[in-house]
Amino acid sequence: MEIFSWILTIATIVAIYSIMGLALNIQFGYTNLPNFGIAGFFAVGAYASAILTAPHRFREMEIFAGFPGGIPGRVEAPFIIGLLVAIVLAAFVAFLIGIPLLRLREDYLAVASIGIAEAIHYIALNELWLTTGSAGIRLIPMPTGNRYLFFLLVLLLLAIAFWVAQRFYHAPVGRVWRGVREDELITSSLGKSVFSARMWAWVVGCAMMGAAGSLWAHYAMAIQPGEFVPTTTFLVWIFVIVGGLRNNWGILIGAVLIIGFFEQGTRFLPDLGAPYIMPALRLIIIGLALILFIRFRPQGAIPERARAIEEHI
Amino acid sequence: MASIFNANDVFLYFGGIKALDGFSIELEQKTITALIGPNGAGKTTFFNVAGGVYPPDKGEVYFKSERIDGLRPDQVCLKGLTRTFQIARKLGEMTVWENIMLAPKNQTGEGVFGAFKFGTVKTQERENWEKAKSLLDEMGIYDERNEYAKNLSAGKRKMLEISRAIMTDPELLLLDEPTAGATLDETKSIMGELERLRDEKGLTFLVVEHKMDVIMNLCNPIYVMYYGQNLAKGDPKEIQTNERVLEVYLGG
């Protein structure tokens, strides 16, 4: 039974990461917006959901002895409120940040988005009244009370995210986004506002990252700022590139391969002599996989596939 | 005849270079006007000003008696003025049909929420494709409809670009060298298509072109541009015999 339990753990983590992968595909694969701040929006969602749902008794814990009146705003809302607020807040933060950020060219956008995510990380680390700092937030309720049911819930949300991402790809809105990716000047000369297309793709993707963050908080039941670092962002990028940027099926494959087998699966292999070898080896192998894919199969395991018009109409 | 577009005394500087130096032009409705001039005369720059890529430093541009200088390219297009590019720019990693279907205005499915109005989107897609189908057929690229645009020959890319511009349902089309890179047959079908659109749909065209036979057979009047200024204007006969034009083109 123990093996079943860790397969369940890995599957849940893979599903949550897949949602972030689909979101990155909307932003970078469809619209050419290299978002290197995934961890930031993941954190916004996770913290929003955690702060809204974690119980009152949390404020009596020893680390808050010095805060008169405890921590404000512990509302013990139900999970669904946490999830919705996580989505809306991530979208709102993305919108505000997007106003200056989306005027930048791709490479500068990538650099600036890392900076934004780090800023969010430091807010989580330092705004003790809101986030309790490096102690993190604990006792976040798992809504179903049961890991099996929670996995099904995550799977359901992944299915919705997948369906939405596919719909966007094939609908006229995805055509405009891909038009912006291919050539901004043509697309705007055809009467499409490039800025508004970029903004929508950005906001929708970040909202999905926020949803993933909420699921993560309720699954792990405890979060702390150290989880929302650039490494999280890079892992998403790596499996999206390996699996197949621009193809949502490829992203699912990539998540299973990279997050499932390498990042999580190898935790259960025997130590190779010393306990620190395996974690290091894991990152080396993931890095190697990335280099090999970029060199020999840049389109990823499953590349973009265009629909014939007969299929579309 | 009514004028649909005019630019008065337009100036545009790039640093110390006067790319447009008081250029003026007026287009009558339902005409195909040519804009010619030696390389570097400022023809493409003028297209960029008219299309909203650069705001002019001085001067006004009117379209349907509305001022359009300073608007963005997408706003200009929505008003009914579509332009094409000299080097056929393409949405390479999109199919020909996706290129074409990007162009129609006011598609419900272009909104993030509108994309989920399944019935409306499907109906609009079918209507737009019906229009696109006959256009692609006339332009001779129907068989390539499911091909990636990057795989088309130079001539067919031009056909795609012109079809795409027509699909925006414009009243005025600015075409930057529509027949460059096209074969003789393709050139003929482009010319035929422009005349048909002018006569049947009442479209107006401004065409930058270097092929003299195309200009002399298709366009009237002809504007000649030189160093960002107006050099001459007239019908093909007048231009062919205009001494200043001959001097500029043949170096006197």
Image (cartoon, coloured by chain):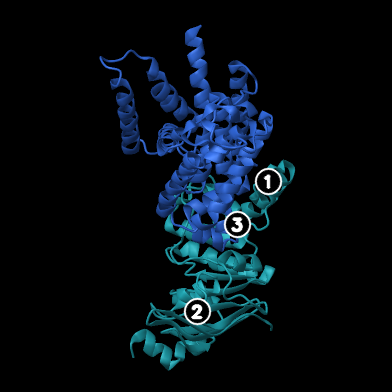
Q: Residues within 10 Å of mark 1 (few under 14, many from 20)?
A: few
Disc 3 secondary structure class: loop
Disc 2 secondary structure class: strand
For marks 1 and 2, the one nearer the N-term is 2
Quadrant where the image shows the C terminus of chain A = top right
Q: Same chain for labels 1 and 2? Say yes or no.
A: yes
What type is the residue that disc 2 sits on? Answer: Leu
Q: Residue at x 49, y 74 (%)?
A: B208
The reply to whether residue A1 is in sight is: yes
Q: Residue at x 48, y 49 (%)?
A: A33
For marks 3 and 2, the one nearer the N-term is 2
Of tags 3 and 2, the one toward the viewer is 3
What type is the residue that disc 3 sits on? Answer: Ala
Q: Which color is chain A depicted in?
A: blue
Residue B171: quadrant of the picture: bottom right
Disc 1 secondary structure class: loop
Kindly indicate whether the residue at mark 2 contacts the one at mark 3 (C-beta within 8 angstroms): no
Point out residue A184 in the picture as x, y percentages from the top left corner.
50, 58
Q: Which color is chain B depicted in?
A: cyan
Q: Residues within 10 Å of mark 2 (few under 14, many from 20)?
A: many
Point out residue B115 in the picture as x, y percentages from the top left corner.
67, 45
Q: Where does label 1 land, which residue?
A: B113
Apparent side of residue A307 relative to residue A113 in the rendered image (left or right): right
Point out residue B28 in the picture as x, y percentages from the top left corner.
63, 81
Q: Residue at x 64, y 51 (%)?
A: B110
Where is A145 relative to B158, above or below?
A: above
Chain ID of residue with mark 1: B
Q: Where does label 2 land, which residue?
A: B35
Q: Where does label 3 land, which residue?
A: B103
Residue furthest out toward the bottom: B243
